[in-house]
């Protein structure tokens, strides 16, 4: 009986420590519905992969952009983290630094990184309410990426950019503005013809839906075919019957993310 009481006090102490570590701006994320795995001694097993989500912002003379920094750390991986940038669609614009986090692509990418025990710093900025990812915002995003690359804490050969809808077009724009920065990119439901001069040789995988009435499939396909003719490594995939919204949600499959993250910049 005494042994059982001691065990109960130990378990309550562990639970109390776990509750006191919660923070709204700097949290270790996990599946809150999944109980911790316990060892035979009754002590919760330490997570192999952790995610810490911190709200931050970057301010230049051009504008201020808030963003989430998700640090994904695999305790069984000693490699430097890759740097991942995700650009949201037009409906997530604002200044609350939270609305953009509701996009399905963010969960798909972060879950992939966790499942593959890949160390990463995952940046999710929020575009100003009346702004777009093309134009001045590109300069701020370039400065943001440089802060992480230049401090030597990430692998400069593993920078990746993703985005859907306005964020997909913004992804094309980042490749145009920074042709030598990224190892690979995945613009989804996007219009690459809006980005101006394009000289990037970055490998790119894009997905378009046949029922998308906002972005034109043929326009994107022609652009990608031109890149392929220039020797750029490309993948063009079509979602049959997919609307614009469905394309933005369903595109981030394991096989496509495998393709993107298999690339490293020379």
Image (cartoon, helix red, strand yellow):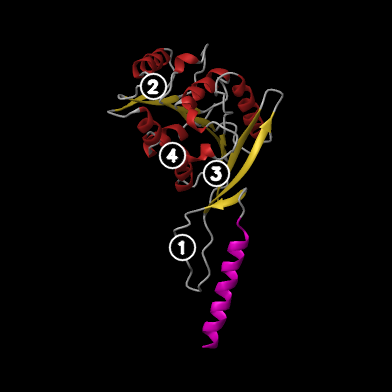
Boundaries of the magenta span? 1-22
Task: Give the alpha-carbon distance from disc 1 to disc 3, as whole Å.
Answer: 24 Å
- The residue indicated by pointer 3 is 119
Residue 127 within the magenta-colored segment of the rendering: no
Q: Which residue is mark 1?
A: 35
Q: Is residue 89 visible to us here?
A: no
Tell which circle, 4 or 2, labels the residue nearer the N-terminal end: 4
CA–CA distance in space, label 2 to label 1: 43 Å
Identified at 57% across, 73% down, the residue is 12
Q: Residues within 10 Å of mark 4 (few under 14, many from 20)?
A: some
- Ranked by sequence position, the earlier of labels 3 and 2 is 3
In the foreground, 8 or 50: 8
Check if mark 3's residue and mark 2's residue have beta carbons within 8 Å: no
If you read the primary sequence from the N terminus, does the residue marked by circle 4 or circle 1 appear first?
1
Name the residue at the left extreme.
Answer: 241
Q: Main secondary structure of the magenta part?
A: helix
Mark 2 or 1, closer to the camera: 2
Secondary element type, mark 2:
loop
The quadrant of the image that shows the C terminus is: top right
Q: Nearer the N terminus, badge 3 or badge 4?
A: 4
> Label 3 vs label 4: CA separation?
21 Å
């Amino acid at each position: 009986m005494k042994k059982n009481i001691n065990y109960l006090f130990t378990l309550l102490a562990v639970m109390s420590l776990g509750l006191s570590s919660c923070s709204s701006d700097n949290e270790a994320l996990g599946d809150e519905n999944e109980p911790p795995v316990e060892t035979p001694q009754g002590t919760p097993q330490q997570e192999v992969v952790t995610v810490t989500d911190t709200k931050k912002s970057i301010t230049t003379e051009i504008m201020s952009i808030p963003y989430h920094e998700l640090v994904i750390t695999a305790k069984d991986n000693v490699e430097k983290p890759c740097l991942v940038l995700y650009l949201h669609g037009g409906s997530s614009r604002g200044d609350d630094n939270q609305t953009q986090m509701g996009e399905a692509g963010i969960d798909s990418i972060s879950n992939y990184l966790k499942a593959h025990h890949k160390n990463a710093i995952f940046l999710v900025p929020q575009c100003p309410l009346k702004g777009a990812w093309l134009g001045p915002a590109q300069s701020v995003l370039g400065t943001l990426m440089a802060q992480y690359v230049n401090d030597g804490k990430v692998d400069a050969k593993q920078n990746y950019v993703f985005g859907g809808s306005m964020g997909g077009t913004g992804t094309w724009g980042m490749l145009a503005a920074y042709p030598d920065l990224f190892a690979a990119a995945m613009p989804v439901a996007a219009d690459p013809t809006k980005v101006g001069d394009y000289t990037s040789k970055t490998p790119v995988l894009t997905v378009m839906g046949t029922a998308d009435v906002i972005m034109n499939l043929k326009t994107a396909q022609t652009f990608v075919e031109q890149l392929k003719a220039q020797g750029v490594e490309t993948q063009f995939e079509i979602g049959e019957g997919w609307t614009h919204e469905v394309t933005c949600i369903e595109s981030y499959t394991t096989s496509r993310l495998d393709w993107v993250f298999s690339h490293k910049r020379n």
